[in-house]
Image (cartoon, rainbow, N blue to C red):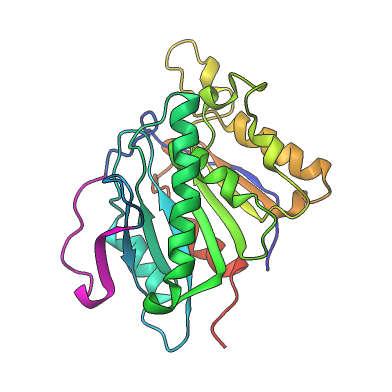
Amino acid sequence: MKAFLKILTLAILFVSCSSNNEGINSNSLTESFLLKGVQYGSESRQFLDIYKAESDCSTPVYFDAHGNGGNTYMPNSIIEDLNAQGVSVIAWESLTSVNTPSEVETGWNDAELMFEWVINNAEEFNLDTSNFIIGGSSRGSIISWKYGHQESPNIKGFYFYNALPDGTWTDPNWWSPTDEVNISSAPIYFVYGREPGSSENPINPDAHDPENGIIIINKYQALGIGDRTALVHSIGDSNNTDKYQFLVDFALSVISSCP
């Protein structure tokens, strides 16, 4: 497992918690390895899409949760790149937006239920429950956070875009993301569209401030596990604004390969 700390300057124009390239997947993926709208719970919002990697052994899984107002769409390119490396992908749904403590708690509960469903059905879908990478954008980082920081050796890493926006930190007496970080927390890779301090930009403020990721990095460092962190910011000012551009390399650095 590679572990590292790096804060690079790159950049992006990604709006709010949502992705402006969310839509409908094309038909290029092999249908026998694609299952959409699989229910993990009884509520209509509780479903997931599974993109299975073809493999003779059980496959690691990357979990993706979208930003506010988005959906479970993921670009075919990143799905195909992960599948080619033997990594299956699950994009899961909960409340499509979370803006209040009660909505966040619903998201946390859905995450628990979703992961329980995946573990219980792993054999059917050839999934390796000891090799999970948890990811997503903005809202997705919030509703995945509690489950991901349980002291479980099965969580191998986190990959988040525009993670933990400013609103996440407004009531630390209720909850603070740093409360969940512990000595067993998995390696984490943050990617941000804007520059540090973006929330205070007088012309074009953005609550998806890399300073929020840096708070988490500081907590990792205080625990002596700072080498498990990485943060890239400002990808909106670069020639490559793809939020997933570092995901495959990160995934391969933390998962166990098929024997």
Q: Is residue 86 visible in the rendered structure shown here?
A: no
Q: Is residue 25 visible?
A: yes
Residue 20 found in image quarter: top left
Hey, which residue is sitting farthest left in the picture?
27
Q: Is residue 3 left or right of residue 160?
A: right
Q: Residue at x 30, y 34 (%)?
A: 69
Task: Place residue 40 in its image quadrant.
Answer: bottom left
Residue that sits furthest to the top in the current view: 202
**Is 30 part of what is drawn in magenta?**
yes
Q: How many marks?
A: 0
Farthest-out residue, front: 42
**Residue drawn 24% across the image and 61% down it:** 36
* Location of residue 206 with respect to 249 vertically, above or below: above
Residue 171 at x, y percent in the picture? 61, 19
Q: Is residue 141 left or right of residue 39?
A: right
Front position in the image: 189 or 150: 150
Residue 188 location (% of width, % of height)? 62, 51
Magenta region: which residues? 22-39
Across and down, in percent, residue 91 comes to 36, 55
Q: Is residue 68 above or below residue 59?
A: above
- Can you say whether 102 is above or below 8 in the image? above
Would you say 190 lies left or right of 48 here?
A: right
- Image quarter in which the C terminus is found: bottom right
Q: Residue at x 38, y 44 (%)?
A: 66
Residue 24: x %, y % from top left:
19, 52
Along the line of sight, which residue is nearer the eye, 175 or 25? 175
Check residue 242 for magenta coloring.
no
